[in-house]
Amino acid sequence: MNNMTVRLSWGLVLVTLSTMVLVACGIGLYALHHGADIVQNSSDLASQQQAFTAFAEQIRWSLLAVVLVTLATVVAVVWGVAANVLRPLDNLVGYFERMAKGDLNQQITAPGNNEIGRLYVAMAHMQASLSQTVGVVRTSGASIFERSQQIASGNNDLSSRTEQQASSLEETASSMEQLASTVGHNADNARQASQLAENATLTARRSGEEVGEIVDTMQEISASSHQVADIITLIDNIAFQTNILALNASVEAARAGEHGRGFAVVAQEVRSLASRSASAAKDIRTLIDTSLSKVDVGTERVNQAGKTMQDLVAAVQRVSDIMDEIAAASEEQSNGIGQVNQAVAQMDQVVQQNAELVQQAAFSANELEDEAGRLREAVERFRVAESLTPPASKPRAAPSLTAQPARSAAPASAATADEWEAF
């Protein structure tokens, strides 16, 4: 009876009702036909009345039997419909109501193999699929909630670090601006020092030329002093010869006697004059020798000063060349620091933009965490079997970031320009 289909049940109802209608119609036709026979075959009114009474009693019992059979059939059909259709549908409605309240752990048993039974089986399959889906959604929601918390925490940490990095980079940019200003000032000073060194080189060259002229003058003075010494030697020789001649004249005057007395006086005066000339020549020689020694010392010192001035000119020229190189290196360094300053400014802008993006990501992660919480609350109202709940997937470990070693500061050398170009 439970396996009877709804279509068969309603078919039996229609067949039964049709049969009852046909039986009633047949009884009616039979009553009309039999009444007409009674009227035709009976001439007596009393016999007709008696025959009609008997026939009416027969029809009454027949109709009563038909009514009873119809009532019994209707009761059987109503009971069958209630048992096979209405009660299973009521149970099915109860299942749906409990399912709507979140109970997905019901034991659904099919009452038969008819349409209602297949509906129960389909509902059981739907409950199993929905339970599995809710279990997956619950597990995924919990995982999403946990991971969204991790993402929110990581984004908050990243936002804090990015803000610190932005602050540090801003300080670095300010320091780079100060360094660029200082290097520019040093480059200006180096250019001025190079100009001063060049002027000093020119002055040293002029001083060297003047010292060379002084050396030449001292050499001429030394030559003149030697010539004066030769002249003094000649004067000394002349005085000596004059003294000898005066002695000879005195001797001859003594021989002449009275006649040579005047000549003797003259010879005495000449001798005295020769003695004074010899004494003066000796003094002059002494002075000339002293002057010659001092002139020689002065000449040697002037020559040494000339060599020193030449060395000084060479040193000043070298200093000028070095100052030119320093000025060129300072200019290149100033240009390189200017480029670094621009790069740091661009990095500052990028870090500021990254900080804004990280803040937006943190805000989105917080919203995702709230949505995951609401999803978990919505799924928690469903009760499912533990066997249908899949295990929660373990979150993947975040990839570790290897710290980059800090770039060592390059020494200040001629390779600085190449490093700036490589940068």
Image: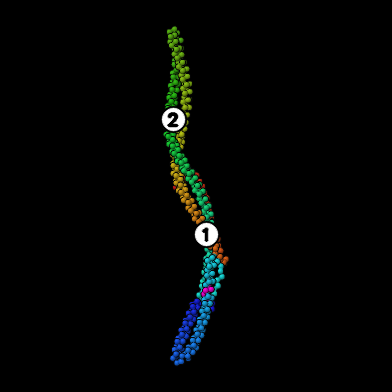
Which residue is labeled 1 in the image?
374
* Residue 395 x/y as whole percent: 54, 59
Residue at figure coordinates x 51%, y 79% from the top left: 74
Residue 157 lies, with reference to residue 379, above or below; the image says above
- State which region is magenta: 84-88
- Magenta stretch, main secondary structure, is helix
Q: Callout 2: 10 Å neighbours few (<14), some, many (20+)?
A: many
Q: To which quarter of the image does residue 40 belong?
A: bottom left
Dot 1: what SS? helix
Q: Is residue 369 magenta?
A: no
Residue type at mark 2 is: Val
Residue positioned most to the top: 258
Residue 338 visible: yes
* Residue 315 x/y as whole percent: 46, 36
**Nearest the eye: 149 or 5:** 5
194 sits to left or right of 86 = left
Q: Callout 1: 10 Å neighbours few (<14), some, many (20+)?
A: some
**Nearest the eye: 143 or 83:** 83
Mark linked to residue 211: 2
